[in-house]
Amino acid sequence: MANETMRIFFPLKIVTYPKGEYGLEDNPVEISPAEAVAYEGAILASIAKENRLFENDRGLAEYIHDEALNKKVYSLYPSVEIVDGELWGVMTAGLTEPLSGEETTELLDYVVGQNADGYEQPG
């Protein structure tokens, strides 16, 4: 079980697809992190729905391939949080023991890779 918590913050790129007369428009609209604050509740609800799909209570940590890092990172879950009036992404890691500098870099690289895939919420 986790003894420590590490929170990793990252900027968000939020793209919406407005509904038109015949369904979703083909023209995506990017909204700023400040504008996205108005949608925090809906985004959190969507993330919570996706988080329930994990097969166990470890979240994204179950997919960490490095064995040593996988043992130290008990859980890893995405979320969002308002920071200075803007919506930011945050990954919360439950750690069984402190990470070395190299392991922290490895975890940050893993989070960047997970974020590169992005999250999609249908219309």
Image (cartoon, rainbow, N blue to C red):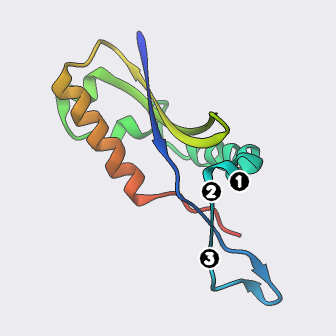
How much space separates mark 2 and mark 1, taking CA atoms? 5 Å
Quarter-of-image position of residue 3: top left
Tag 1: Cα neighbours inside 10 Å, few (<14), some, or many (≥20)? some
Q: Is residue 25 left or right of residue 6?
A: right
How much space separates mark 3 and mark 1, taking CA atoms? 15 Å
Q: Residue furthest right?
A: 21
Which secondary structure, mark 1?
helix
Along the line of sight, which residue is nearer the eye, 51 or 5?
Answer: 5
Q: Please name the residue that numbered disc 3 is placed on.
A: 28
User: Vertical placement of 67 versus 44: above or below?
Assistant: above
Disc with the residue nearer the chain's start (3 vs 1): 3
Tag 2: Cα neighbours inside 10 Å, few (<14), some, or many (≥20)? some
How much space separates mark 2 and mark 3, taking CA atoms? 13 Å
* Quarter of the figure that contains the N terminus: top left
Q: Please name the residue that numbered disc 1 is placed on.
A: 35
Observer able to see residue 115: yes
**Which amino acid type is shown beneath numbered disc 1?**
Glu
Q: Please name the residue that numbered disc 2 is placed on.
A: 32
Which secondary structure, mark 2?
loop
For image coordinates 62% across by 50% down, the residue present is 33
The location of residue 21, given as percent across then percent down, is: 83, 88
User: Vertical placement of 42 versus 3: above or below?
Assistant: below
Along the line of sight, which residue is nearer the eye, 26 or 61?
Answer: 26
Quarter-of-image position of residue 60: top left
For image coordinates 28% across by 34% down, the residue present is 107
Observer able to see residue 1: no
Counting labels gives 3
* Quarter of the figure that contains the C terminus: bottom right
Which secondary structure, mark 3?
loop
User: Vertical placement of 106 versus 72: above or below?
Assistant: below
The location of residue 13, given as percent across then percent down, is: 53, 57
